Image (cartoon, helix red, strand yellow):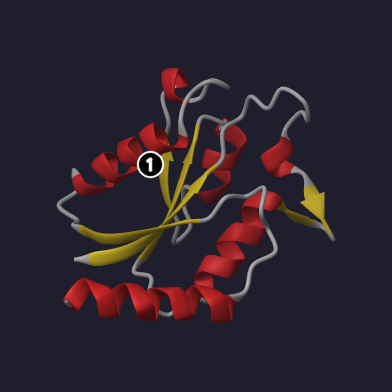
Amino acid sequence: MGNVAIILAREGSIRLKNKNRRKINGISLVDWSINFAKKINFLNDIIVSSDDQKILKKYINNSIIVINRPKFLSKKESSSEDAIIHAASEYEKKNRKIDSILLLQPTSPFRSLQAVNYAFKKYNYFKKK
């Protein structure tokens, strides 16, 4: 069983073109999320789900697991929940079991490692009850 981070990065942003590839201080929004996930000790894998071929190609030979998200899950009206279920299903098809999912949205790049670790500690506490 494993704990995974899922990063959803669809291509078709309406208001801000290529939003997930935009850079803050020289680092793309997707990279902010990946770099943050790499600092989390309890994660077994990092999954990037996208329909953006540039994003998928960038991480294909990396330690990141890439999931090519179908177009019907990449529309502006598509739900994040459906995209997460798709990514988790594709991940588990490779005989990997998911115990917990941490969703890291590229559009929220500023996070607290302390807060995430605290939340995971609480999650485990209540999961055992």
Q: Residue at x 50, y 25 (%)?
A: 74
Q: Is residue 84 above or below residue 64?
A: above
Would residue 45 appear left or right of 98 to someone viewing this image? right
Point 27% across, 40% down: residue: 90
> Can you give x and y, in whole percent of width and height, for residue 126 in the image?
26, 75
Residue 48, percent across and down? 47, 47
Amino acid at dot 1: Ile
Q: Residue furthest right?
A: 25
In the rendering, at what x and y percent does residue 93 appear? 18, 43
Picture layout, residue 65 above or below residue 53: below
Q: Which residue is mark 1?
A: 84
Query: Residue at the spot x=51%, y=29% of the render?
Result: 51
Q: Quadrant of residue 99?
A: bottom left
Element type at mark 1: helix
Seen in the image, is 30 located left or right of residue 83? right
Q: In which quadrant will I find the N terminus?
A: bottom left
The x and y percentages for residue 78 are 48, 24
Q: How many neighbours does mark 1 have within 10 angstroms: few (below 14), some (14-19), or many (20 or more)?
A: some
Q: Name the residue: 17% across, 76% down.
A: 129
Q: Is residue 63 above or below residue 78?
A: below
> Which quarter of the picture shows residue 35?
bottom right
